[in-house]
């Protein structure tokens, strides 16, 4: 039993004054300002979370771009001491593709170290040190020789480099 239209208008005005509303089925229900505020707050919270997540993603991407996607490994430093008429250590084992810094130190006179097959040549003055960075590209055993004449036993100065997978 539905009341006539004029009666409905009068009732609606009274309901609106009492913070009531009619739903689709014509039943009386209270207005829900709290529910609306809650929905607005939920939407605002969702927007804020989305913004915060996007900011964090951009920050992370920016850090990756600045520092590289994966941090590069520092080259392995190997100190070699050259003295009349030997290198210390006399043998080295390296991995292929792993960057290496050879630090050549001279104790007495000028020396050098050259691996022709690997394209490595470094020279050092008396009592000084010098370094060369390289990445072994081939596997095998390579013999390096002193490349600066340092006396009568110069020809016997050898360093063996083993490059493995």
Image (cartoon, rainbow, N blue to C red):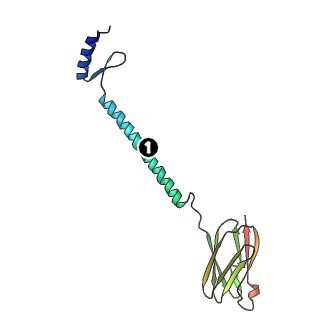
Q: Is residue 24 left or right of residue 137?
A: left
Q: Secondary structure at mark 1?
A: helix
**Residue 90 image position (x, y, % from top left):** 71, 79
Q: Residue furthest top?
A: 1
Q: Is residue 19 left or right of residue 150?
A: left
| Residue occupying image coordinates x 73% and y 71% | 162
Picture quadrant where residue 111 is located: bottom right
Q: Residue furthest front?
A: 6
The number of discs equals 1
Q: Is residue 154 above or below residue 75?
A: below
Picture quadrant where residue 156 is located: bottom right
**Residue 49 image position (x, y, % from top left):** 42, 43
Q: Is residue 84 left or right of residue 11?
A: right
**Residue 55 image position (x, y, % from top left):** 44, 50
Q: Residue furthest bottom?
A: 152
Residue with the mark numbered 1: 50
**Residue 83 image position (x, y, % from top left):** 67, 86
Within 10 Å of disc 1 (Cα), the crowding (few <14, some 14-19, many 20+) is few
Q: Is residue 28 above or below residue 89?
A: above
Q: Is residue 46 above or below residue 129?
A: above
Picture quadrant where residue 97 is located: bottom right
For the C terminus, give its image quadrant: bottom right
Q: Is residue 138 left or right of residue 75?
A: right
| Residue occupying image coordinates x 29% and y 11% | 5
User: Which residue is nearer to you in this view: 156 or 46?
Assistant: 46
For the N terminus, give its image quadrant: top left
């Amino acid at each position: 039993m539905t009341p006539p239209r004029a009666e409905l208008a009068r009732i609606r005005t009274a309901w609106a004054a009492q913070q009531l509303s009619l739903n689709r089925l014509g039943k009386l229900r209270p207005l829900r300002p709290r529910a609306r505020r809650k929905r607005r707050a939920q939407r605002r919270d969702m927007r804020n979370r989305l913004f915060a997540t996007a900011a964090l993603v951009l920050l992370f991407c920016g850090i990756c771009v600045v520092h590289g996607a994966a941090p590069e490994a520092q080259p392995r430093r190997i100190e070699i001491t050259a003295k009349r008429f030997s290198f210390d250590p006399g043998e080295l084992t390296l991995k292929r593709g792993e960057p290496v810094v050879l630090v050549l130190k001279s104790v007495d006179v000028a020396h050098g170290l050259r691996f022709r097959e690997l394209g490595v040549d470094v020279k050092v003055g008396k009592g000084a040190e010098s370094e060369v960075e390289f990445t072994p590209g081939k596997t095998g055993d390579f013999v390096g020789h002193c490349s600066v004449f340092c006396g009568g036993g110069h020809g016997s100065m050898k360093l063996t480099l083993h490059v493995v997978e």
